[in-house]
Amino acid sequence: MDTSLPTPSAAEVAHSARLVDAIRQEIAARGPIPFARFMERCLYAPGLGYYSAGRQKFGAAGDFVTAPELGAVFAQCVAHAMAPVLRACGEDGTWFELGGGSGAFARDCLLALQQLDALPRHYWLLEPSADLRERQRECLRGALPADVFTRCAWLERPPQHPWSGVLFANEVLDALPITRFAMQAGDVFEEHIGLGTQGAFARCERPADPLVAGAVRHLERQLQRDFAGGYRSEVLPQLPWWLQAIAGEQARGAALFVDYGYVRREFYTPERTDGTLLCHYRQRAHDDPLILPGLQDITASVDFTALAEAGINAGYDSVTYLFQSEFLMAAGLDAVFAAARAAAADEAARYALAQQVKRLTLPGEMGERFQAMLFARGLDAGALPPRLLAADRSGRLWSQ
């Protein structure tokens, strides 16, 4: 990790100070707050949180680069994989994207679906940030044909009525506010954030409530070992309820999640004694979430075994789990790459395309650090690409 962080501008410092003051007031009134609440405020506080403010976040000029920001290949592969699902859902088939980032994924996905004659009736984006909603509208309005853009709609909450189609989330789960836990003499404690000297944020621990303690004991049972004293990590006890709230009204279709993370036995290795928490600021990664509130992203890796459990409990019919590189290959990367290369204007464009594919697929880049999980509900087996089903690695989710 590169900890030589750039110096924030005066405007950024002032912005962060306003959020710091708001969090300090909450702590002064309530006492130390759970880390999950601190993370929620840092990321999503209206007008002040990282995802609520206006500074650019995605791409080379932002804090980190996501797969859609590298180029169109990622979205085109996802579109190829999910087009049969949209067709199986009929004329009312809908694409529901969580987040949406800069709008790059929606743009490239819709253009690819148009070429495949598989446009959804609606393309919904659930985006909590007013600033990002405007950026997405600008991106899509400028890039899409008018009749395609009219299919786009921004939601303020998950749909409250039955719908069919594709639910898609790329790098969404890693930004859900996580619970930090610590073990002391066999007991489960939850990390809180209080105030230290001169009002600085400081970590402290309090006995975990039954929900958090139960989630940690579930991990120990699944792993068939107890966490050692001093062991610290993260857990998402609210994940089953979150997924049910997001996808509960999906009557038919598929749900695809792509993110960085591990299966449970790799997430909670005895050697990883301080979890997976990571922060990003201007293309630098570090592990201190208490600095730069509102200016930096705060994330944690995904426990894909927990995601599988939540999906099954939410009533999904099947689970397909792969490394991102395997998903892209099974989704038709070879054909997508060949078509893009043939259409490239010159050698420089062909080189950039090759570099994009390398970033997406090499094990040391995104190829294995990022993983894909596909759920299905109410679909015939023929609606899912056979190559995706054949490449399934779900056995890794449950092995010890």
Image (spheres, grey):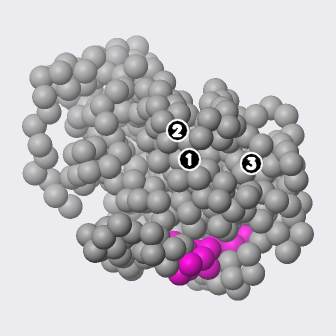
Crowd rating for badge 3 (residues with CA inside 10 Å; few <14, some 14–19, many 20+):
many
Q: Which residue is mark 2?
A: 140
Residue 145 tag number: none
Which structural element holds mark 2?
helix
Residue at horizontal 36 percent and vertical 33 percent from the top: 50
Q: In this picture, which residue range is highlighted in magenta? A: 318-335
Q: Is residue 32 left or right of residue 178?
A: left
Circles 2 and 3: CB distance less than 8 Å? no
Circles 1 and 2: CB distance less than 8 Å? yes
Q: Is residue 385 left or right of residue 339?
A: right
Q: Nearer the viewer, residue 215 or 210?
A: 215
Q: Given the image, on which type of amino acid does mark 1 rest?
A: Ala
Tell me which label, 1 or 3, sits earlier in the chain: 1
Residue 329 placed where, x, y %?
Answer: 56, 79
- Disc 1 from disc 2: Cα separation: 8 Å
Q: Is residue 110 visible?
A: yes
Q: Is residue 166 left or right of residue 231?
A: right
Residue 106 tag number: 1
